[in-house]
Amino acid sequence: MTTPLEGNHVGEWAKKAACWDAVSRVPWTIPRALASELLDHSLDEAALAGGAGGDEGASEAVALITADEWFAIERWAKETRNLEPWQRQLAQFVGRRLELEQEVPETQAVQALHARTEALRLGFTPHP
């Protein structure tokens, strides 16, 4: 599918419905390892859509974690490369907002809590 049918640049071709139609007809089976990985991480659709999905109060939960811990998550993630760059930036953003005694918007708070949970799962240890 990297050879455009209409003579366009591949990046432009990939945006066209005809390309997506062609790709959707390619027979493909999800590899077992990928399928099990995808099943292990269920998505909270409401949280991703910015809805309540049980994440109400995320701003308050984020504020219970010190700014220093958010900065430590950012440093740890940068050193270990265990989080995505946007997650590191979000940890820094949250730390700054808390330092300035500003509320963290609910949408960012939800994602920050997910990033912190991922950091803890991957070995980040908060210092008391």
Image: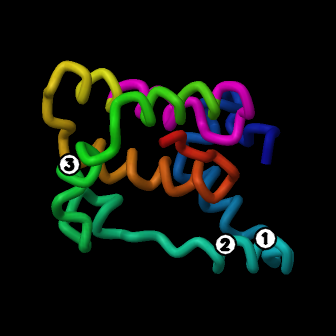
Position in image of residue 19 (x %, y %) = 64, 50
Q: Looking at the magenta stretch, what is its main secondary structure?
A: helix
| Mark-to-mark CA distance, 1 and 3 | 33 Å
Q: Secondary structure at mark 2?
A: helix
Amino acid type of disc 2?
A: Leu
Amino acid type of disc 3?
A: Ser
What residue is drawn where x is 67% and y is 28%? 8
What residue is drawn where x is 24% and y is 29%? 98
Assess whether mark 2 and mark 1 are in contact (beta carbons under 8 angstroms). yes
Q: Nearer the viewer, mark 2 or mark 3?
A: 3
Q: Is residue 87 magenta?
A: yes
What residue is drawn where x is 43% and y is 34%? 70
In the displayed structure image, the side of residue 113 where residue 64 appears, left or right = left
Q: How are the residues colored? A: rainbow
Regarding residue 63, the answer to whether it shows in the image is: yes
| Mark-to-mark CA distance, 1 and 2 | 6 Å
Position in image of residue 35 (x %, y %) = 75, 77
In the displayed structure image, the side of residue 14 where residue 52 appears, left or right = left
Give the extent of the magenta segment. Answer: 78-93
Picture quadrant where residue 100 is located = top left
Tell me the residue that label 3 is attached to. Answer: 59
Amino acid type of disc 1?
A: Leu
Tell me the residue that label 2 is attached to. Answer: 38
